[in-house]
Amino acid sequence: MSPAPTLPESIDLAHHLAKRVRTVQPSAMKALGALVGSRKLLTLGGGTPHPSLFPMSHASFTLPKLSTLNGDVQDWQQGEAVTEEVHLKKTGPGTENDEGGILDLNDILQYGLSNGFPELVHQLEELNELLHGKTISDSSIYITLGNTDGVSKVFQLLVEPDVDTVLTEEYSFASSLNAARAKGAKLYPIKVDGEGLVPEDLEKVLSTWDEKVQGRKPHVLYTIPCGQNPTGSTQPQERYDEIYRICQEHDVIIMEDDPYYPLQFAAYEPDVQKRELQLKEARSKLPPAPEHAKDDDVQAVARVFNEYAGVRSFLSRDVDGRVIRIDTFSKVFGPGVRLGWVTANSTFIERLLRIGETTTQVPNGLSQSVLASYLSDKHWGIGGFIRWMWGVRLEYQNKRDYFLDRLNEYVPKNLVSTVPCGAGMFQWLRVDLTSHPRYRKNPINSSAETAVNLALDTVGKEPEVPPGLELKSTNEPAQYTSNAGELMDELWNHLVEHGKVVLLPAKVFIVEKEGVDQSEDFNFFRATFAGDLENIDAALKAFGDSIKEWFAKA
Ligand code: PLP
């Protein structure tokens, strides 16, 4: 797919680069390798191992045939799908690999280009364009080892150690937070509610930032806008627009970590019969899959995929080049392939490449060749991959629905509430600690005699807000002390000891705020519905029984 000629170039955003990466020189050896390849030179230069000494002459794998990818992946799950095999071979000069592998094992097992196999890069450019469109002419791709790697490299790219503060949702994915800290960043929480990051809070934090007191004004927002981990929230379109506008106004780079984007769901429908009909209808929405990828109506497939999705990415709105989008194959292929890709303006991608040359060197050749084979027109093509993601999405939607059914059945709403998630793998469960007999919240600075036990006012009441997340008080200095944190620890232990069930407590995900007691914000658990239905059923039953028991005990 070629970019429309009228697209603007990204604006100059080089001032966002951390000093340590501005001056990294390109690898002389990689440059030499490219020169040798392009001019067909005789070389005594590179120290590449001899391919005749690679102890592998053949590798093969099996995949469902494109013609089976019509929205339902159950045949594949049950081992009944029509399949085909791909063979990766050493072909050598002048021989044709006509057995389905699109790359030669000699190349796959050799050092390669730091930004990945060109075949895969082109395929991902096409996939990007189908899912997000193209808004700047110099948008480029860098292949990573998955989003953990992508996120970490992008922090390295942008964070000035011990100077920068990165803005992020007040609850966020713990290993990304650790990656930011490891690169020398401080973190600052932005409020979230049932619809993700709250733009008004972002605006307030940026426009009231006091550099004398708080240090350099933040220029990076790390966000998981869709199926957020851990809260499961997905931002409505207007929030994407608003957040993008605020970031433009304050010159902030948006790191869009988006592993769950392909897993966007229809709204939860509690009526099982209605829901099954809707699911059946959704499964039949795709145009019939052809035998050969070159005959697939890729645009029509992408249209179905995009229209069902509730939201479009930050990347699809990016007219400046200020979005760094971070994608992964982990949730829609398999985390073990350790592959993903970053999309950004060409200046940022060029610097990521320099970071890659001194860290991962080249992405794993075997994994790249497997993915490039799936995505090639010899097998699924890009359309086939979108078809696969569509089927996977509907499976997770079904799991989400089953999870919510069982939650409603086993767990009392006055103790635990949630907002059905619109994407991803997580439900964020709010525990109404105020209903517990030992819950205490006392104003700070009040004497023992006058301390008001606010809990007394709330015991036995339904939560005031709609079930789920409400605005938190983390951006205001705490005016109280609370035992919510201790109660959540106690509850977690009780669930493990008595219910034999594990959920992840909010304190694992919370972004700390200096000098603020955040224990009132600990009253959530992250639960995943990604597992087997039997496991969901048993775990939620155990959760419901033991949480009732814990609340009943004084
Ligand atoms: N980012 C987020 C928000 C995640 O939820 C995950 C999940 O594991 C990751 C990154 C890690 O992805 P990967 O397996 O691609 O490293």
Image (cartoon, grey):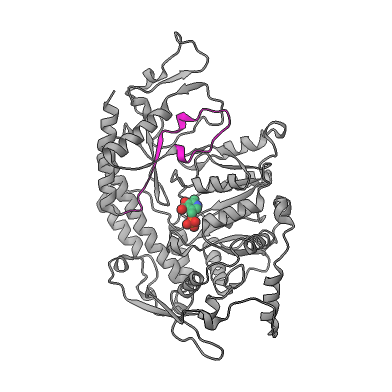
- Residue at the location (72% across, 32% down)? 212
Q: Which picture quadrant has residue 48?
A: bottom right
- Asked if 133 appears above or below 19 in the picture, the reply is below
Image: magenta residue range: 507-531
- Residue at the location (31% across, 39% down)? 496
| Of 359 and 242, the residue lying toward us | 359
Q: Is residue 118 magenta?
A: no
Q: Residue 226 at x, y = what percent?
A: 48, 50
Q: Main secondary structure of the magenta part?
A: loop
Q: Is residue 270 left or right of residue 512?
A: left
- Asked if 510 appears above or below 240 in the picture, the reply is above
- Asked if 538 appears above or below 137 in the picture, the reply is above
Q: Residue 255 at x, y = what percent?
A: 59, 51
Q: Residue 528 at x, y = what percent?
A: 37, 48
| Of 68 and 42, the residue lying toward us | 42
| Of 16 and 358, the residue lying toward us | 358
